[in-house]
Image: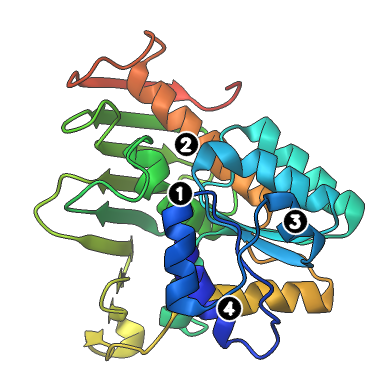
Amino acid sequence: MGILHLTKLLKLPQVEFVGVYEPNFEKTQELLNRFNVRTFSSFEELLFFSEAVVIASPTPTHFSLAKASLESGCHVLIEKPLCETVEEALTLDLLALQKGLVCQVGFLERYRFQALMAGQTIPFAAYLESQRLSVVVGREPSVDVISDLMVHDIDLILSLVKEEPVQITAEGFCVVTEYLDYARAKLEFSGGRTAVLTASRVAPKMVRGLKAVFDNYLCELDFITNTKFLASPLTSEKKETDPILFDALERQALSFVSSIQSHSTPLISAQHGAKVIQVSKAIREAIANKKGPLPIRRHLDSTLPIRGH
């Protein structure tokens, strides 16, 4: 992801690209050969020359790197998930607020959703269903499928419902790793709305989609083809849009730069990132049913209230 971020930032006229810190020597050489960018010998040296940084490192390092960045006066864009605990996320949020800095979380589907909906809204009481399926384990094999994939849809659904769930039902499986490779969660909200999320990294094909269903309304978004299918009396007919040309990572970079220049709150703040971590944790607890660590290849199912977690 670091290289992908690098390619987008190099193209932005608003950005003076300072350089990269990469602790792996071979990867550092690759960056030098491919992009001819400056590389730093330490993270502290990078911070000294920077006004803003993108953190695309393993999740356990996010908190320490982001905290050091904010303390040195740098704005930060942090790859998902923001960090490992709610407490860490809230610490970053408070630190950014105290120093007047931007602390943004990298959830790309927000930008795809905005582009596909083009100003249209989903009915308040709609039933939501997301699927995020992959054929292989993602970039971080040492995390479960909730942190690897499902967090994108947790973020998107919380942003649409605008409240935290009051009850969660979940089930999960370990299949090819020691961590959950398949998870399915049902989130129930106080207003009667329901969302069902499925994430898998042992699927036969890749799927990235969100469906919203309500009386006389159905909307399906495909985040791979960047298309939208809508069926409603308001449209007079069923309609599928043509694919849109859209670069979510570039839009995210532009949004980050815009928040810095306008001194505004980012679209996805550390505070919202903390809520995503809280719900992710509650889903894991619902799967484990508080019986201790989840044994490999064992299936557990439970229903737990989220309040009090």
Specify the amino acid type for callout 4.
Leu
The reply to whether the C-beta atoms of the residues labelled 1 and 2 are less than 8 Å apart is: yes
Residue at which label 1 appears:
154
Question: Who comes first in sequence, dot 1 or dot 2?
Answer: 1
Specify the amino acid type for callout 1.
Ile
Local secondary structure at mark 2: helix
The reply to whether the C-beta atoms of the residues labelled 3 and 4 are less than 8 Å apart is: no
Q: Image point 37% across, 15% down: which residue?
A: 289
Question: Who comes first in sequence, dot 3 or dot 4?
Answer: 4
Residue at which label 2 appears:
280
Occupied quadrant, residue 210: bottom left
Task: Note whether 202 is above or below 120 in the view shown.
Answer: above
The one of 265 and 53 positioned closer to us in this rendering: 53
Residue at which label 4 appears:
9
Q: Which mark is residue 45?
A: 3
Task: Note whether 212 is above or below 204 in the view shown.
Answer: below
Q: CA distance from mark 3 to mark 2?
A: 34 Å
Local secondary structure at mark 1: helix
